Image (cartoon, grey):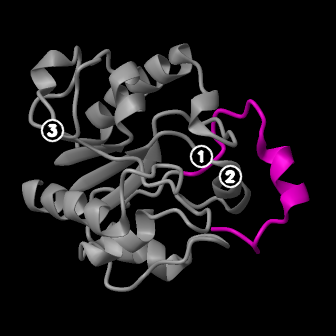
Amino acid sequence: MGGGRPGREDLARFATDDPHAMDDVLPAAPARLRLLIAGINPGLWTAAVNAPFARPGNRFWPSLHRAGLTDHLVDASTGLSAADERQLTSRGIGVTNLVGRATARADELSREELRAGGERLISRVGDLRPDLVAVAGITAYRISFAQPRATTGPQDTSAIRGWPNGVALWVVPQPSGLNAHETVASLAGYWRQVWEDR
């Protein structure tokens, strides 16, 4: 999906208003989508290589591997290889974002962008009909879905206006290295539970 590792000077040009800074990773229809993972928004590195959670040091791929969702550790820092993409999609795993615009940090997004992202995700879920959706980031989830008291773990979808019936919803912690509260091991514990719950 991508080219080489971007240099520091390359990253700034990806901080644009482009609402589609990264392509979704999705199984081809009519394959079953068992788990749709929704990040908050692409970072600049992710946008530069067009691969989810691509920045070196992000704990997403190590935690997915430790949880058994991938059979080897994916290195997306230069893009997602066709083999790695097939590994995900053949298992029914897809990846998208709440907000498509790339930023250096997720806290650069406005509340309005996050709310619009929540509405967009609800619409996408209605179209894609995954078994389960996992949003990676509790603060963004609370704003996007107007659930200020939500905690990580399974969510009560009846509290979310428009959420499609029969689609389970989880929130897992943000895997960025900026989230000092979590480790690869603790994040893997969440992903194991999510995979078992789908």
| Along the viewing direction, whichever of 144 and 23 lies nearer the viewer | 144
Q: What residue type is labelled 1?
A: Pro
Residue at the location (81% across, 53% down)? 11
Q: In the rendered structure, does residue 43 fall within the stretch colored magenta?
A: no
The answer to whether residue 148 is left or right of residue 174 is left
Residue 32 vertical placement versus 149 (above, below): below
Query: Mark on residue 167?
Result: 3
Q: Mark 1 points at which residue?
A: 42
Q: Is the magenta stretch mostly helix, strand or loop?
A: loop
Quarter assignment of residue 51: bottom right
The percent position of residue 170, horizontal first and vertical second, equals 21, 42
Q: Is residue 92 visible?
A: no
Characterize the local packing of mark 3: few (<14), some (14-19) or many (20 or more) Cα atoms within 10 angstroms. Answer: some
Q: Which amino acid does label 3 sit on?
A: Val
Characterize the local packing of mark 2: few (<14), some (14-19) or many (20 or more) Cα atoms within 10 angstroms. Answer: many
Give the SS element for disc 1. Answer: loop
Residue 97 vertical placement versus 186 (above, below): above
Residue 21 vertical placement versus 165 (above, below): below
- In the image, the segment drawn in magenta is 1-23
The N terminus, quarter of image = bottom right
Q: Pick whichever of labels 1 and 3 is earlier in the sequence.
A: 1
Q: Name the residue under label 2.
A: 47
Q: Nearer the viewer, mark 3 or mark 2?
A: 2
Residue at the location (49% across, 23% down)? 114
Q: Is residue 83 visible?
A: yes
Query: Mark on residue 131?
Result: none
Give the SS element for disc 2. Answer: helix
- Whether tag 2 and tag 1 are in contact, CB under 8 A, the answer is yes
The C terminus, quarter of image = bottom left
